[in-house]
Amino acid sequence: MSRKCGMKIAIVAILFCAASFNSALGQSTADPEKPKPAPPSPPDKVCNAYFLGQQKGYSTKQIWCYYVSQLFTPSATAGAAFWAELSQVQSSPPEWQQGTVGYSKRFGTNYAQAMTKQTGAFLTNLVLRDDPRMFPSPDKGGWNRTKHVILNVFTASPRDSPGHDLRFSPAWIVGSLGSGFIGNAWYPDSVSTVGDGLKRSGTALGGALGSSFYQEFGPDVLHWVQKLFTPKKPATTGS
């Protein structure tokens, strides 16, 4: 059996398992303070409506707009640039020379892998009718929120119940596998084995975990940093 054929069979099997076990693995999340629904979006701003709130009834166009918006972000560009520079320093793969040409190959490869991960995850969510977004935890406490960070990578909410009724979703697993093996189409033979593809897939899944962590704790970290560097007002003394 060829490597490509094996990958296709594995992805189909994962999707089948997800569809079979969603009802068994689903779980509800408490939401004592439900946000107010966002106002209807004007026809000329249908793409922006997806970001206004967590209301139900998204159109297919809004879902696709969200997907496209995730492909071209500053963080995606910065991430590809960072990993390209790291590979450049390590001369990985060694067959790719240094300088602008080598860096361009590494940057393009990293960006293509990121786009493949997003595409694989999005298409999986589309097939399973899951909401493609990660939602912050409604619970308090560091441990509960940390568990939610991990669950975000392996679960999703139904499209008609965003942020609620979490169920198993293989979206990021499928996307990470695609990301890990897509480079084998042009990587040199020295780094295009099945083992190399699995290593890159693991790194891609770790990136999804990092995104979930930022989604959950990013606002807290930014608030802490802002508070740390904000000058304290001098205490006033009564006359």
Image (cartoon, rainbow, N blue to C red):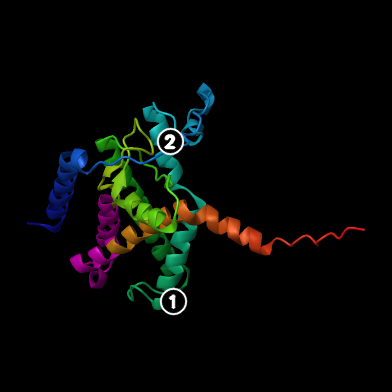
Q: Dominant secondary structure of the magenta stretch?
A: helix
Q: Vertically, is 56 above or below 79? A: above
Q: Position of residue 231 (x, y in %)?
A: 74, 62
**Residue type, label 2:** Cys
- 186 horizontally vs 71: left or right: left
- 40 part of magenta stretch: no
Measured in 3D between alpha carbons, the distance from the residue under mark 2 to the one under mark 1, in whole angstroms, is 36 Å
User: Which of these two is toward me, 205 or 233?
Assistant: 233
| Residue positioned 38% across, 40% down in the render | 30
Residue segment shown in magenta: 173-201
**Local SS, label 2:** helix
- 60 horizontally vs 25: left or right: right
User: Which of these two is toward me, 171 or 151?
Assistant: 151
- 186 part of magenta stretch: yes
Q: Which residue is mark 2?
A: 65
Query: Which quadrant does the C terminus fall into?
Result: bottom right
| Residue positioned 43% across, 47% down in the render | 136
Mark 2 surroundings within 10 Å by alpha-carbon count, few (fewer than 14), some (14 through 19), many (20 or more): some
Q: Which residue is mark 1?
A: 89
Q: Position of residue 195 (x, y in %)?
A: 20, 68
Front: mark 2 or 1? 2
Check the image and name the residue furthest to the right.
Answer: 239
- Asked which quadrant contains residue 105, the reply is bottom left
